[in-house]
């Protein structure tokens, strides 16, 4: 590099800027491309697949995965991992039903208690990771196991209480000309709130810094552990909301209904281009990741494919996308490392 | 393990017979030849059409400033990096001792030395540990180093580790041995040890390429000298063709006075911004000195003698275990600043030595990296305001002559020098900066970027900002600092005024002599 | 230190291998004390049948934890071992062929599955995502082989698997042997030395021209193999195949390896320490069982044990591993002598 520098701040044309912006979000393009391809495949493979109402309904039925995946994405961006999401969803299901006891009057109370429980579990996760310096994988795995043991012991396998009918009917309720499911609206609302925090505030900026390089952020005066704890609390709350949504949709509390969600949220985030090293990826990616999983599952179900094969396909998609994203992110960012 | 366990020279060898500088490589076929090597990393043209040859049993000193392309060239010579164009021919194997040690701290010296080629009880069978220890001892003996081969490497001093690393390379019996700043942590007696060992290797026909910033060592070790600047070879020939002055000016490409800005004539204010008062902890003790507004205070020392700790104590990265840190005449608390955050609140900022791991957030954009520290003050309502941000970052980028395509560009894509500028720019954005603590701020930074960084430093100092500069580059300290404190074994061994300091003076203090 | 150094000098074992035994001895001591207390306090614990069932319980965990320990030593993780164990049980119960054929199939599947993980990891997939993915895949395959718990294990396989000498099961002895072999391989071969180097610092290992890829491929293959063998040892307890039976073992194997002092960050630890760690875990399960506590309390106990272990390591000033605690601190960069 020569000693004399070119004129600074060469920003280039608008088109050039757009190109750079797109390049920076290569992994988003890939995940949205895959989601679109699966949407087309879904539309072709199933009768009536083109109807927007059906697509919206399917997305609405999977709002719980979308909401939980938002939490997982935020934790991954912080450089962590939350393997307690499934157990927290079950926990929310069990405690909210126990509070509601099938009464509409208790809905608010049930939701509040479930969210508080989820936030509390997140807080414990966050403190174990940031204060006790336990690797996130192990901390959340252990906490998840304890939570799981906790509600099994509490319910002895038989959840008490029941889902309030008002909440159940909300699962079927539609808004905006009766085509948009209520839960889809909730999902998007949570997304907007979290995206606003991440991309429009200084907290979000510092949060990304803490995730991308905790040491560099700490040396720049960022209270890294607060942001890390915050990420886990947010994830716990998202998981609790997701657990309530799942319970409302299925109509009965369950101690194991959400077991598969831990894996699915990780898969959604990874498919959406969120990296494990922290600070890499966008919240919007998780939306595409969820869409990919949902359409994939729906197509496989429509084709009457064995659920065992679905496991295999999901695992393969997860690994495949990780390989693709690695190729895309690998260069230039300097964030190699397994 | 105390330093004293390291014995010095094993047996004296006849140096004069082999190191007499001849008129150039004649007769014997070259042990190394490279032709028109060229390498780019993105926007950076790291090495430009470099051709070199070196005879068997000869030593070449590869000179150049930080970021001149030496490391890239050496990586290509060692076959660790593929050149874009050009070729390398070596008559045998190449062993490299990198500046950054690549030992395994939890394994013993013996295990480290024989890694990957452990002797075995039978082919394919388990490791023969007795033979392994014997082999390792022999490797250390060749260097004249006396250490217990069963010691875990993590327990050795930096100098001892450096010697083990060199022993590992020597044990491979390479045709070409590349040493990248092998003396940065060595005391003079250990440098003698290394010198004797390389002379012995040369006598056996091994060629040596050697990188060092210490001029007297260069003239002592080298038969030939090659100088790089901005990726290109700008001078090569027998060592006898160079003088200290001609070597420095061809490295820098301009007179030194042009690289380092003029000293400020103004007397620094009397009241210090920050004062160390008998500070200690983490291997340093009894550190007392003051930094006044407008002053650049340098800390020198060999690698591993506590100078980084002093920087970290000043910036709140580590807490004091003894003494106190005085800010504006009043104590900062029982153990200094509680955290970098507390230090920043008091106007003390820190530029860490390793920008890739502790300085920058590589996957994030230039804008995100620039504003991370100032974010809350830049946007008091906590809501990002793009226009206000551009108004703030634009002039900083311009002042630093940052070369970039867009503020949204990932900082990891920039060249080393531009990355370092972003790291500096982060603190220029913070209002109320009073003390800037720099730990090896120009490592891997090209000369152009260095000149700009130095200029900004002087400008800051002239505006009344105090600067604490820790550096392994003595010329840099001499060129910039008003006052230089030299550390040895965790304490300040002596202090010299910057304008009259010499390398010899600093080295003597750094080695614990005088 | 000098006396120790002299004794090491003549030892046929490596210095680091020997040093790694120190924390193993410590955990062994702890587990022996625990066993003695349990034996004094609890009458049913002393009964030969209980001892036999304890040992039967330990066998699969010993095997799977030893494999996990190898992978953690590389600074990786293998979450797929549980599904691999389940897969091995259904393969044993669904194939209705001879014992030899079953063992051959299980060994091959274990090696191949582990190799798959290894290939993913060396191509740059995060070990966690990779093994999370294969966890789903192995589970899917297990469900395809046998949709429900059940099946018939060939008699000529079940007989040796359930053989007991006195009250010591053959599977337990074989598992001990397996752990010992893996320990020696990981501590006293070229591959083992490279394993510790790769786990300690992969970039350094590459620079030292160690065969990094091969080392990792072997490590993950061995983990797959030992998980599959653990599945067979599990068959000796459940007498059938079950596509979900291995699920808890992913966490259990990690817990055992970490209690045994294998550093989460890689490059340190001794596989042998897995033996007392597994004994401690099995003891916890066993005592909770004997106390007649609802079985899900075991979940809580295990989670708490894992967290306490890791928190204790951190509180001791060293983020990972008893090894460093036993050997004292390391110099930090910048610290003077």
Image (tube, rainbow, N blue to C red):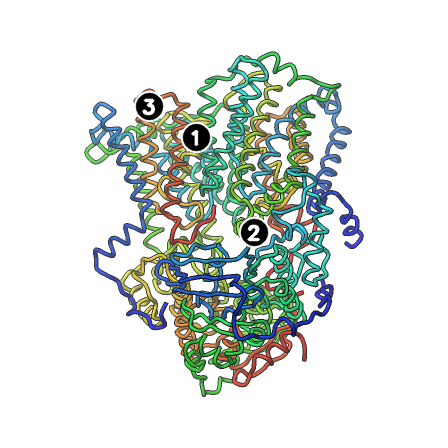
Q: Are marks 3 and 1 on the same chain?
A: yes
Image position of B467 with respect to B210: above or below = below
- Determine whether the residue tagged by mark 1 lies in a helix, strand or loop: loop
Image position of C195 with respect to C40: above or below = below
Q: Which residue is mark 1?
A: A260
Instruction: Depth check: give the residue in front, C287 or A32.
Output: A32
Instruction: Depth check: give the residue in front, B176 or B227.
Output: B176
Q: Which residue is mark 2?
A: C208
Q: Quadrant of the N terminus of chain B?
A: bottom right
Q: Quadrant of residue B228?
A: bottom left
| Residue that extends furthest to the right in the rendered view of this protein | C3
Q: Are marks 2 and 1 on the same chain?
A: no
Around disc 2, counting alpha carbons within 10 Å, would you say few (fewer than 14), some (14 to 19), or many (20 or more)?
A: many
Instruction: Depth check: give the residue in front, A52 or B84.
Output: B84
Image position of B20 with respect to A296: above or below = below
| Label 3 – label 2 distance at C-alpha | 51 Å
Camera-nearest label, 2 or 1: 2
Q: Report if residue A218 is visible in the image.
A: no
What residue do we see at 55% from left, 58% from top? Answer: B96
């Amino acid at each position: 590099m020569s000693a004399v520098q070119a004129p600074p701040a060469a920003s280039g044309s608008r088109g050039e800027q757009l190109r750079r912006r797109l390049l920076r979000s290569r992994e988003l393009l890939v995940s949205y491309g895959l989601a679109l391809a699966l949407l087309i495949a879904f539309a072709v493979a199933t009768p009536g697949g083109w109807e927007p109402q059906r697509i919206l309904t399917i997305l609405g039925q999977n709002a719980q995965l979308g909401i939980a995946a938002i939490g997982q994405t935020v934790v991954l961006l912080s450089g962590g991992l939350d393997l307690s999401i499934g157990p927290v969803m079950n926990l929310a299901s069990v405690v909210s039903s126990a509070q509601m006891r099938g009464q509409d009057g208790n809905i608010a109370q049930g939701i509040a208690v479930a969210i508080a429980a989820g936030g509390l579990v997140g807080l414990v996760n966050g403190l174990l990771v940031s204060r006790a310096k336990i690797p996130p994988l192990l901390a959340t795995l252990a906490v998840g196991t304890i939570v799981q043991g906790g509600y099994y012991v509490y319910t002895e396998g038989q959840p008490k209480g029941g889902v309030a009918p008002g909440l159940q009917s909300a699962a079927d309720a539609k808004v905006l000309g009766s085509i948009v499911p209520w839960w889809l609206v909730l999902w998007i609302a949570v997304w907007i709130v979290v995206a606003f925090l991440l991309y429009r505030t200084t907290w979000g900026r510092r949060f990304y810094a803490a995730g991308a390089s905790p040491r560099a952020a700490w040396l720049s005066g960022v209270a890294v552990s607060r942001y890390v704890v915050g990420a886990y609390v947010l994830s716990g709350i998202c998981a609790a909301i997701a657990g309530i949504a799942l319970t409302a949709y299925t109509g009965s509390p369950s101690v194991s209904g959400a077991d598969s969600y831990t894996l699915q949220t990780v898969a959604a985030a990874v498919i959406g281009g969120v990296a494990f090293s922290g600070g890499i990826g966008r919240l919007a990616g998780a939306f595409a990741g969820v869409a990919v999983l949902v359409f994939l599952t729906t197509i496989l179900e429509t084709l009457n494919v064995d659920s065992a094969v679905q496991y295999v396909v999901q695992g393969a998609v997860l690994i495949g996308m990780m390989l693709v994203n690695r190729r895309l992110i690998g260069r230039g960012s300097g964030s190699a490392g397994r | 393990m105390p330093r004293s366990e390291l014995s010095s020279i094993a047996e004296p060898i006849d140096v004069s017979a082999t190191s007499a500088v001849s008129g150039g490589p004649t007769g014997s076929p070259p042990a190394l030849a490279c032709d028109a090597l060229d390498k780019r990393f993105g926007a950076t043209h790291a090495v430009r059409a470099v051709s070199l040859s070196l005879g068997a049993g000869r030593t070449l000193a590869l000179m150049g400033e930080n970021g001149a392309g030496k490391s890239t060239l050496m990586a290509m010579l060692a076959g660790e990096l593929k050149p874009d164009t050009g070729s390398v021919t070596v008559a045998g194997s190449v062993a490299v001792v990198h500046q950054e040690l690549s030992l395994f701290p939890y394994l013993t010296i013996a295990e480290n030395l024989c890694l990957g080629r452990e002797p075995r009880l039978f082919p394919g069978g388990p490791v023969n540990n007795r033979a392994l220890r014997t082999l390792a001892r022999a490797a250390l003996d060749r260097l004249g180093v006396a250490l217990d081969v069963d010691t875990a490497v993590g327990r050795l001093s930096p100098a001892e580790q450096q010697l083990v690393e060199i022993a590992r390379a020597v044990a491979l019996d390479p045709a070409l041995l590349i040493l990248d700043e092998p003396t940065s942590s060595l005391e003079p007696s250990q440098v003698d040890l290394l010198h004797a060992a390389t002379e012995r290797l040369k006598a056996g026909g091994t060629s040596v390429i050697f990188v060092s910033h210490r001029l007297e060592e260069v003239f002592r070790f080298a038969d030939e000298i090659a100088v790089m600047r901005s990726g290109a070879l700008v001078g090569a020939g027998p060592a006898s063709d160079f003088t200290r002055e001609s070597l420095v000016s061809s490295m820098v490409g301009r007179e030194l006075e042009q690289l380092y800005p003029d000293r400020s004539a103004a007397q620094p204010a009397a009241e210090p911004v920050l004062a160390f008062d008998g500070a200690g902890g983490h291997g340093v003790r009894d550190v007392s000195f003051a930094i006044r507004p407008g002053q650049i205070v340098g800390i020198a020392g060999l690698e591993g003698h506590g100078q980084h700790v002093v920087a970290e104590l000043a910036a709140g990265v580590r807490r004091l275990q003894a003494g106190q840190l005085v800010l504006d005449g009043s104590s900062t608390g029982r153990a200094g600043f509680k955290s970098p955050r507390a230090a920043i609140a008091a106007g003390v900022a820190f530029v860490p030595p390793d920008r890739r791991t502790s300085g920058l957030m590589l996957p994030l954009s230039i804008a995100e990296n620039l504003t991370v520290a100032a974010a809350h003050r830049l946007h008091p309502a906590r809501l990002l305001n793009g226009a206000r941000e551009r108004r703030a970052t634009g002039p900083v980028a311009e002042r630093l002559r940052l070369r970039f395509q867009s503020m949204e560009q990932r900082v990891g894509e920039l060249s080393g020098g531009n990355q370092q500028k972003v790291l500096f720019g982060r603190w220029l954005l913070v209002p109320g900066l009073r003390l800037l603590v720099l730990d090896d701020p120009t490592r891997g930074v090209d000369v152009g970027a260095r000149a700009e960084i130095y200029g900004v430093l002087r400008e800051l100092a002239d505006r009344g900002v105090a600067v604490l500069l820790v550096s392994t580059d003595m010329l840099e300290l001499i060129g910039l600092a008003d006052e230089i404190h030299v550390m040895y074994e965790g304490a300040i061994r002596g202090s010299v005024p910057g304008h009259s300091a010499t390398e010899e003076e600093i080295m003597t203090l750094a080695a614990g002599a005088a | 230190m000098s006396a120790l150094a002299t004794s090491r000098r003549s030892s046929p074992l490596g210095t680091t291998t020997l040093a790694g035994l120190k924390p193993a001895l410590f955990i062994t001591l702890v587990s022996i004390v625990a066993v003695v207390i349990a034996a004094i306090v609890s009458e049913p614990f002393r009964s030969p049948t209980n001892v036999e069932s304890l040992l039967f319980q330990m066998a699969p965990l010993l095997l799977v934890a030893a494999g996990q320990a190898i992978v953690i030593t590389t600074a990786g993780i293998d979450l797929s071992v549980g599904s691999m164990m389940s897969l091995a049980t259904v393969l044993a119960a669904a194939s209705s062929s001879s014992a030899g054929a079953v063992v051959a199939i299980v060994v091959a599947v274990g090696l191949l599955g582990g190799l798959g993980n290894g290939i993913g990891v060396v191509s740059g997939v995060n070990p966690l995502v990779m093994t999370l993915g294969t966890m789903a895949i192995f589970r899917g395959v297990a469900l395809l082989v046998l949709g429900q718990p059940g099946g018939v294990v060939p008699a000529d396989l079940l007989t040796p698997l359930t053989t007991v000498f006195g009250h010591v099961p053959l599977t337990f002895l074989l598992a001990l042997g397996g752990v010992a072999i893996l320990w020696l391989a990981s501590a006293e071969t070229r591959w083992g030395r490279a394993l510790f180097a790769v786990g300690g610092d992969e970039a350094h290992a590459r620079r030292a021209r160690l065969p990094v890829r091969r080392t990792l491929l072997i490590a993950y293959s061995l983990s797959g193999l030992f998980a599959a063998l653990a599945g067979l040892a599990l068959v000796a307890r459940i007498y059938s195949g079950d596509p979900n039976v291995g699920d808890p073992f992913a966490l259990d194997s990690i817990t055992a390896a970490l209690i045994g002092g294998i550093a989460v960050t890689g490059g340190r630890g001794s596989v042998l320490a897995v033996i007392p760690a597994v004994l401690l875990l099995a003891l916890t399960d066993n005592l909770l069982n004997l106390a007649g506590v609802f079985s899900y309390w075991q979940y809580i106990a295990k989670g708490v044990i894992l967290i306490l272990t890791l928190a204790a390591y951190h509180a001791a000033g060293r983020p990972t591993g008893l090894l460093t605690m036993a050997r004292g601190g390391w110099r930090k960069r910048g610290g003077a002598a």
